[in-house]
Image (spheres, helix red, strand yellow):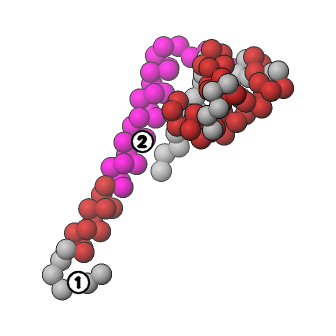
Amino acid sequence: MQKLPKGRYTKEFREQAVKLVLEEGLSLREAGNRLSLPWKTLQHWVAAARAGTLGEVGSQLRPLTELEAELARVKRELAEVKLERDLLKNVTVYFAKASQPGTRR
């Protein structure tokens, strides 16, 4: 299975994500799901915000160009679609075997 590419996020995005958790009271998982963001990443950002160092997170990385950001988004989407396709293949095989005459489950 192919590993999903790491995301790079703007400072404003990180601040808004942390705001969902700290000010609006969403859980880390719920906010992460809404933003298509790993909850562990969000947990790291919330801890940095509480320590007052959120602005330093990601400062050592160079910003993505629009083309790089689009490529990363498309790669993530492709990986997700491949996972869904593989799941549907497995489900189809399972139900095909279960519907054959002479088989009981």
Tell me if residue 100 is in the magenta stretch. Answer: no
Q: Which residue is mark 2?
A: 80
For the point 29% across and 68% down, the residue is: 94
Nearest to N terminus: mark 1 or mark 2: 2
The answer for how far apart the CA atoms under marks 1 and 2 are is 33 Å
Say which quarter of the image contains residue 53: top right
For the point 62% across and 20% down, the residue is: 16
Tell me if residue 68 is in the magenta stretch. Answer: yes
In the displayed image of the protein, which residue is found farthest to the front?
A: 24
Give x and y (percent) for residue 15: 66, 19
- The quadrant in which the C terminus is found is bottom left
Q: Write down the region rendered in magenta.
A: 61-87
Work out whether residue 30 or residue 36 is closer to the camera in this orientation and state it.
30
Q: Which residue is mark 1?
A: 103
Q: Secondary structure at mark 1?
A: loop
Numbered badge on residue 60: none
Q: Main secondary structure of the magenta part?
A: helix
**Callout 1 crowding tier (Cα within 10 Å): few <14, some 14–19, many ≥20:** few
